[in-house]
Image (spheres, helix red, strand yellow):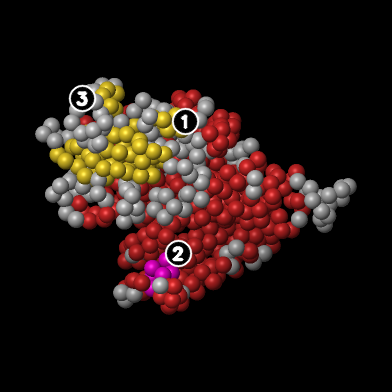
Amino acid sequence: MYRAPVDDIAFALNEVAGLRAAIDEGLFPDLSPDLVDAILGEAGRFAGEEVAPLAKVGDETGAVLKDAAVTMPEGWKDLYRRWVDGGWNGLSLPQDHGGQGLPGMLGVAALEMWNSASMAFGIGPILTMGAVDALEKHASDALKALYLPKLISGEWMGTMNLTEPQAGSDLNALRARAERADDGTYRIFGQKIFITYGEHDFTDNIVHLVLARLPDAPAGTRGISLFLVPKFLPDDDGVPGARNDVFCASIEHKLGIHASPTCTMIYGDGFAEDREPGAVGWLIGEENRGLACMFTMMNNARLAVGMQGVAVAEAAYQKARAYAQERRQGKAAGHDGDGMAPIVLHPDVQRNLLTMGALTQAARAIAYCCAHATDMAEAKSGDAARHWQERANLLTPIAKAFATDVGVDVASLGVQVHGGMGYVEETGAAALYRDARIAPIYEGTNGIQAIDLVMRKLPQSGGEHVLGYIAELREDVEAVRASNLPAFGRSAEKIAAALDDLEAATRFMQAALADGRTDEALAGATPYLRLFALAAGAACLGRGAVAAQSAERVALCRFFCENLAGETGALRERACDGAESLALAAAALN
């Protein structure tokens, strides 16, 4: 059974990402170290004792659709109500409308725990929190007043409706349409697919944020608007009334996260009673400016999905480690007992477990550093705020892509540690592997994250921001060297080499973009992102090990640096020199 690693989470927040320093600086006056510990401790208890026990029934039963209504697995509706009553939905949401206003870092840490306990449960609140952010930043005061208190409390849930059968990542192909109505509202028509929690029985209303085109809209993404479309039309007091013309036509039968209803939503088919066809919607922001509004929601969701990768990796590591300590096979050096040795004593199993633990901690550190940057951008002003916003921008695609790749890699290793028992459903290792596989795909595939990193984030501040970040990471190398701890082995040398690879590849990407060699940059974008993450992850583990001065953290840092960080050399070659071979091979396939 999953047990939240509260100490590891608190350490990563405070000593690696910088929460304690921010508290000491007075940036979060309502927050103290004791309160942080209390929140993390209670979140860990709730995740382990209340969410995790229902994960299996969620996986086995799944969400069930009948007559356009989705019923959640047994016990899940009550679980959601207890979760809401605990105040978890509003933990880091705005105080103006009922939230607790705590730093986003705490919300991200709690998300890790919900998703470790059950990724199918944890994904639902992610969309609601993203909807809150989009409305808070872009909606009219009237929409905020009506919808934000309900969404922040968790009384209602939110969704994000982008994808259509012909329009996945390329929103230029979007066909859903909106028509202006005489009363200032709009009528929405079209079909959306892959809508997470598009229909369920958790709440008495669901608030859909929907991208659609107006009849006179410009072509392409410049002609997309964002609309708020509730399942039930509320009155002025927020009481749900008439059913809107939006329905769930089907739910997907998926590889994993079975209890998360992934819906096909139909807008404006005339199913609503006593009204002309068309789902009633309200404009968010300005006409034809909806993509900018939606990206507010998507950017937050991308970090949250990165946390799903960390979460599944942590759960898989815990499960594999416990199994390896119990399972006995063969002889092993150092085993003094009678009979077969626990497999945790075999070097290959040890290597797998250490790889799982090291990757998980590196991914957690990067994701929490990203959350910290977002918090600092909001807490600071002027040039400092711009600096931290650029840092959040830089780290978001890395946190999303690396952490979700790690989730898949670690869950796969978890199946391997279990051996044949990992391939059957009894142990739960397979369920984690199945759940993990969606995270590198949704909220922008990891290939898109790599493109975003290279094309949009490296050029920030004329390319100086990323170089400044690399320089900051070199300070961690010097801290490892200055510690003079023999247990670090060659860690400082290996982190320095990884950062050399990162800087060389970064300058290559910047030069390629400056010279108009965009295809070369894009050909190396994915290995470049992995290189970036491994180098940054190694530095973060070094930072944490120096801060802790504990044998366990120093040893894990050394293992990462001497066994995993060396991949950066090959990744640098692929990022800088792989374009020609890729183009030739692709041409041969075609």
Residue 290 falls inside the magenta stretch: no
Query: Cα distance, mark 3 to mark 2?
Result: 52 Å
Residue at numbered disc 1: 72
Q: Position of residue 536 (x, y in %)?
A: 50, 60
The three-letter code of the residue at mark 3 reads Asp
N-terminal of the pair, mark 3 or mark 2, is 3
N-terminal of the pair, mark 2 or mark 1, is 1
Residue most toward the right?
338
Q: Position of residue 323 (x, y in %)?
A: 70, 45
> On the picture, is 118 further left or further right than 375?
right
The tag on residue 274 is 3
Closer to viewer: mark 2 or mark 1: 1
> On the picture, is 415 further left or further right than 476?
right
The quadrant of the picture occupied by the N terminus is top right
Depth check, front residue: 276 or 389: 276
For the point 54% across and 68% down, the residue is 568
Query: Cα distance, mark 2 to mark 1?
Result: 37 Å
For the point 26% across and 43% down, the residue is 190
Closer to viewer: mark 1 or mark 3: 3
When asked about the image quadrant of residue 87, the answer is: top left
For the point 48% across and 66% down, the residue is 527
Highlighted magenta segment, given as a residue range: 520-525
N-terminal of the pair, mark 1 or mark 3, is 1
Query: Cα distance, mark 1 to mark 3?
Result: 29 Å
Residues at marks 3 and 2 touching, judged by CB atoms closer than 8 Å: no
> On the picture, is 568 further left or further right than 30?
right
Residue at numbered disc 2: 526
